[in-house]
Image (tube, rainbow, N blue to C red):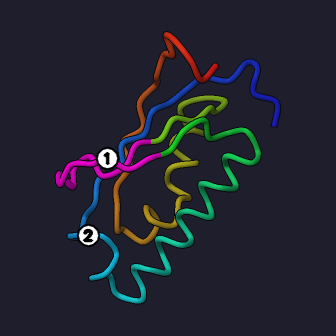
Amino acid sequence: MENNNLSVYSVILSATTKFGEGNNWTEVEKAVMKDHLEYLRNLYNEGTLLQAGRTEVLDLSTYGFLIYKAENDEKANEIAAKDPIVETGMMTAKVTPYKIAFGLN
């Protein structure tokens, strides 16, 4: 994917269920997390995802943070909605246009 003229978006992932460090997850939650990470890996490999990570706080409203490029707001929301962790309802995604001041260009 050629990303030269695409807009940048930040995504805050909020958990809808209580997550531990993985040792308390059900088999379904483990499978969804695996699918979520694979989805992000594919977005990164195609050049869409610039950065992804998990916050270090125990606040489920800001569980994860992504930065990616998309053609427009609609496409950015579509990318977030197709994430398996969002599709299953384990997390919600808040997509916001983002302006990079330094780095990750």
Q: Is residue 28 above or below residue 15?
A: below
Which contiguous range is marked in magenta? 53-65
Element at label 2: loop
Q: Quadrant of residue 68?
A: top right
In the foreground, 52 or 91: 52
Outermost residue toward the top in this view: 101
Q: Which mark is residue 22?
A: none
From the top left corner, tell me how far across and down residue 80 is, in percent. Answer: 50, 49
Q: Which residue is mark 2?
A: 19
Outermost residue toward the right in this view: 2
Q: Quadrant of the N terminus?
A: top right
Q: Is residue 100 above or below residue 93?
A: above
Q: Is residue 61 magenta?
A: yes
From the top left corner, tell me how far across and down residue 9 is, in percent. Answer: 50, 30
Q: Is residue 89 above or below residue 6?
A: below
In the foreground, 27 or 92: 27
Residue drawn where x is 62% and y is 64% of the image: 38
Q: Which residue is mark 1?
A: 55
Q: Amino acid at mark 1?
A: Thr
From the top left corner, tell me how far across and down residue 90 is, in percent. Answer: 34, 68
Q: Amino acid at mark 2?
A: Phe
10 Å crowding of disc 2: few (<14), some (14-19), many (20+): some
From the top left corner, tell me how far across and down residue 16 is, in percent. Answer: 25, 64
Element at label 1: loop
Outermost residue toward the left in this view: 59
The Cα–Cα distance between marks 1 and 2, rounded to whole angstroms, is 13 Å
